[in-house]
Amino acid sequence: MVTKHLRPRRRRLALIVTGALIAAVVAGGPITIDRADATTPRGARITSDVPSPEPTPTPTPMPSLTPSPTLMPSPSPSPSLSPSPTPTPSGTPSAPQTGVTPAPGPTGFPAFGAYLDYGPRGVTRMTQLSQWLGGADLRVGHTYLPGDRWSNIEGSPEFLDSWAKWRRERDDRLFVLNVPMLERNEAGVSDGGVRALLQRGAAGEFDQHFRTLAEHLVTLKVPDTVIVLGWEMNGVTYTHRCGPDPGSWRRYWTRIVTAMRAVPGQKFRFDFAPSRGRDAVPWTRCYPGDSVVDIIGMDAYDQPAGLSFDQQISEPYGLERQVDFAKKHGKPVSYPEWGLFRNGDNPEYMRRMLAWMDDHKALYNTLTDYCPHGVWQCARNPQASKVYRAALTGRDKPTAPTPPVAPTPPVAPTAPATPAAPPSCVPVRLGTWVERWIGGRVCLRLGRWGQRS
């Protein structure tokens, strides 16, 4: 029914429009028809030159949101120590830089690890031990050069390659290498034989072996290796012991350090590590001097039988003497070897020793993990194993970086619904159909009427 009445209405509207146009011409007011954009079915949206009675406000564009910076975990401080001083031309080593600081991990604890095997299996087992400790970060790798012959003490690249590769994988790792001072190191050489060998070493006869070792380490790109030289020198086990001739021993140590520091590119640190207690000779008698020592270490096993941990602290040349001596000489402490021994499965020792090393901010520590000393590869110590595992599970576990936050795309501004109208123009509303028929809305400019008035 709407269709039947459409045409008569259109005729009447056309007559009205014609009359309006004639009146506008007579009045002399110009007619404006505005096409703003192309959104109607005819290809253009038709608007008047003036705003509608209720104009649509123009929305304010949203500003672009700058994404917050992604918070990345701070890099762990490297356990690599400050560079060694360059030897003086005379061959006498100059004083090393003092104040070498420990290398705490992300949680503030010193670096730790364990001795697990001499060769490549030791590297593989570090990953396994880390898994047993809930992903704890073992940042210290520790092995020993064989002391049977000079060719092995020189450190063949084939022996060291796996350890060097592990060290190079991350800057915050520490490679600790025990280096014998004499060949046939566990051959039961007599005191007289040891004395003669120390005197030959002090005269420089064995320097080349240690230069070769230093060159191998630099070539393998591990020039910051910690060298535990002549360990447990205050005892009777090794040929490189100090007791038969402390003076020659100290001079020999100095020759070795001088020879290794003379190799270009080296950054070695030398760890003086006696066994805890007096043993065969007070270890302070063997100390070669601050200029050739960087770390005051100690091999500290739970022995002898019946000795409490408090006694291990306070005994002559015990744990307390070590930290006091190190403080006096401006050196950090370390524990290259430690573990259970004569007192069996001793959870109290394990608990106290772990706390001692943390409290005194040891540069590093490595548990000797085989029977009777260990807790992972040795099933004899289940109670101490529980203490060790509980204390170190998850320690310094690397955390995944926070994923970056994607920036919010900016909101495109919306075009205004109607453009601003020019002044002195009055719209004539003729209805939707008429405006479509004539191609736009009619706006009468009244400038001439204004002049006549």
Image (tube, helix red, strand yellow):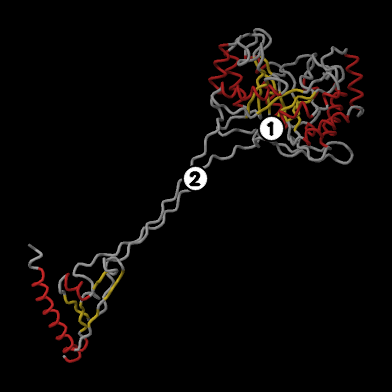
Direction from residue 415 to residue 263 in the image, left or right:
right
Direction from residue 85 to residue 419 in the image, left or right:
left
What is the count of numbered marks?
Answer: 2
Location of residue 246 (image quadrant)? top right
Residue 411's disc is: none
Location of residue 223 (image quadrant)? top right
Q: Which residue is under mark 1?
A: 167
User: Which residue is depicted at the point 13% across and 77% down?
Assistant: 14
Location of residue 82 (image quadrant)? top right
- Check disc 1 and give the amino acid type: Arg
For the C terminus, the image quarter is bottom left
Give the percent coordinates (x, y) of residue 225.
73, 32
Q: How crowded is mark 2: few (under 14 residues within 10 Å), some or many (20 or more)?
A: few
Q: Nearer the viewer, residue 262 or 58?
A: 58
Direction from residue 371 to residue 15 in the image, left or right:
left
User: Which residue is depicted at the point 44% across and 53% down?
Assistant: 66
Q: Which residue is under mark 2?
A: 70
The numbered mark, 2 or 1, whose residue comes first in the sequence reads 2
User: Which residue is depicted at the point 88% across and 22% down?
Assistant: 198
Give the percent coordinates (x, y) of residue 252.
86, 27
- Check disc 2 and give the amino acid type: Thr
Q: Nearer the viewer, residue 330 or 31?
A: 31
Relative height, residue 55 to residue 201 (above, below): below
Relative height, residue 170 to residue 159 (above, below): below
Q: Nearer the viewer, residue 304 or 208?
A: 208
As drawn, the residue found furthest toward the bottom would be: 452
Direction from residue 411 to residue 78 in the image, left or right:
right
Q: Which of 17 and 410 is in front in this view?
A: 17
* Label 2: element kind: loop
User: What's the distance in space between the residues labelled 2 and 1, CA to CA?
Assistant: 29 Å
